[in-house]
Image (cartoon, helix red, strand yellow):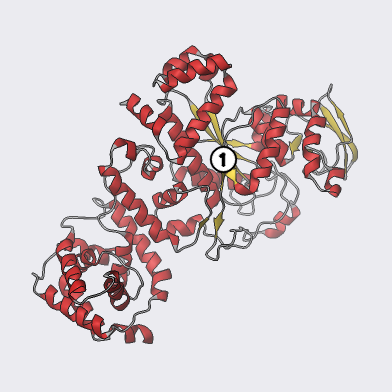
Amino acid sequence: MLQDLETLARDARSWPFEQARILLTHVLKKRLSDGERDAARLLIDAGKADEALAAFEALSRPVVLETGYGPSGLPHMGTFGEVARTTMVRQAFRALTGDHWATRLIAFSDDMDGLRKVPEGVPNPEMLREDLHLPLTKVRDPFGTHESFGAHNNARLQAFLDSFGFDYEFMSSTATYRSGRFDATLLTLLERYDAVMAIMLPTLGEERRATYSPFLPISPITGHVLQVPTLERNVETGTIVFDDPAGGRTEVPVTGGHVKLQWKPDWAMRWTALDVDYEMSGKDLIESVRESGKICRALGGVAPEGFNYELFLDIEGKKISKSKGNGLTMDEWLRYGTPESLSWYMFGSPKSAKSLHFNVIPRAIDDYLSFIDQYRTQEPAKRIDNAVWSIHAGSPPEVASPVSFSLLLNLVGVANASSKDQLWAYFARYLPGAKADSEPTLDRLMGHALNYYEDFVKPSKSYRLPSEQERAALLDLAGRLKALPADTVDGELIQGEVYAVGKEHAFEPLRAWFGALYEVLLGASQGPRFGSFAAIYGLPQTIELIEAGANGQLAPAANIS
């Protein structure tokens, strides 16, 4: 079975597997000679990754994937997207190599950066203003819960990642610099200072070039992270000399956490020191990735593989900006949708720009549910490319929800429901014996539907009066449904009557008939499968709704409200 999975992974076409194959090629090239690489590749392609690992000692080191986080603010949608997508690549790599090859996912917090401005919406801004330019792990915590602002946000990051079940290793820039883990690479950078400057200076403006240094010394007097020129560098002693505004000419070692690197050299230094094999980033960082890769090579390292994902757009098609607040926050998505639906949204077309606003959540939920349903009947070669394989690490749930999210939204509206208990009452006949503990996904979706309807659907409801053709069809449908047993819960039987009425009354195209049902009865331009909706809502209640719509009783009430 394991070998079958490896075979499927080699042929899989979804982007995580494409990236996994690229990563495998990168690691083999990075660690082995040409002849060794060919031999190892033959073994791996034959489903014998364990033999390849045993034959070549260089392959025994874990494959390292990294994601980065700037803790000057709280974790956000981009943080989730980067970790989720990198995790998908990691899972695909494990499948490709039979899970013989150890992997690590490092969530790196750049918490040694100086606080350059006071973030919006944070308590005690005056206190933060007093701590400007200190490393984030020296800035006092405005929330009063941790020893520093950086520690507070790091804790939030870890709690955030843990809540989604991500498997990762947290790493702090401050702790890593101070531990000496970066010392050897920092000394190499000091030695190759001119090569690094030759890469960086052409990318800077004239004024910036005059003062630029890859080293940001920490002032021994104020503790500030200083952006000052390096006046001298002493390779033999491992030190730099700079002019400290608080104390004049000063010499400090580049090791032991006495300096912090500018972010592009810092990125390259991390790749080298931590032997990073894979890191993805946003399309806006393409040039930064290129320059950091050059610095990595100048330090004797090998730049990691990865790809640049597209950024999200707001409802007007504009780039989302944290400072403008025109995006969708994690808390907002999770109020209206499930974590799985967010992972589904992150899976789809990462190299294409996508809108990220409230309107996409219902569709994302229903698409995720439909992919779960498809997975049950797909052949293995299709399953491994199904998004839910990547979302659930190869083990998606057997079942999702018996009804769609869009149906729940309409049920909430028509039933005027304000609690889960009211919604469960409608399902008592449709799903006999079903309860929250036996249908946990449905129960969660009910909560999301109640929130989404109240905040977005209800304010935008717009019923209309039926045309003469539509009124006749609605009354005909009501009559046909009255002929059915009142306790009918067969959605397909009801749906058959809906189709028959649409054809009998010559709606062309037939979808115009369904549009009329949604607009006249539900006050929306789209809706769920009407037969399923009627089965859950109840046949007598549905008949009453249809007759009210046919007689124009719904539109005036909506207009008055």
- The residue that appears at 35% across and 73% down in the rendered structure is 524
Quarter placement of the C terminus? bottom left
State left or right for residue 519 relative to residue 544.
right
Question: Where does label 1 land, which residue?
Answer: 307
Q: Is residue 88 visible?
A: no
Q: Position of residue 374 (x, y in %)?
A: 29, 47
- Residue 37 visible, this angle: yes
In what quadrant of the picture does the N terminus appear? top left
Element under label 1?
A: loop
Image x and y of residue 295, in percent: 72, 33
Quadrant location of residue 179? top right
Total numbered badges shown on the rendered structure: 1
Residue positioned 24% across, 86% down in the render = 551
Residue 103's place in the image compared with 342, above or below, is above
| Residue type beneath disc 1 | Phe
Q: Is residue 319 above or below residue 111?
A: below
> Residue 76 location in percent, x, y?
55, 52
Pinpoint residue 103: horizontal percent, then vertical percent.
49, 28
Residue name at image x 58 percent, y 49 percent: 145
Please indicate whether residue 119 sits to the left or right of residue 8 in the image: right
Could you say which is closer to the camera, residue 11 or residue 365?
A: 11
Q: Residue 523: name its quadrant.
A: bottom left
Q: Nearer the viewer, residue 176 or 191?
A: 191
Q: Nearer the viewer, residue 76 or 114?
A: 76
The relative height of residue 508 versus residue 555 in the rendered view (above or below) is above
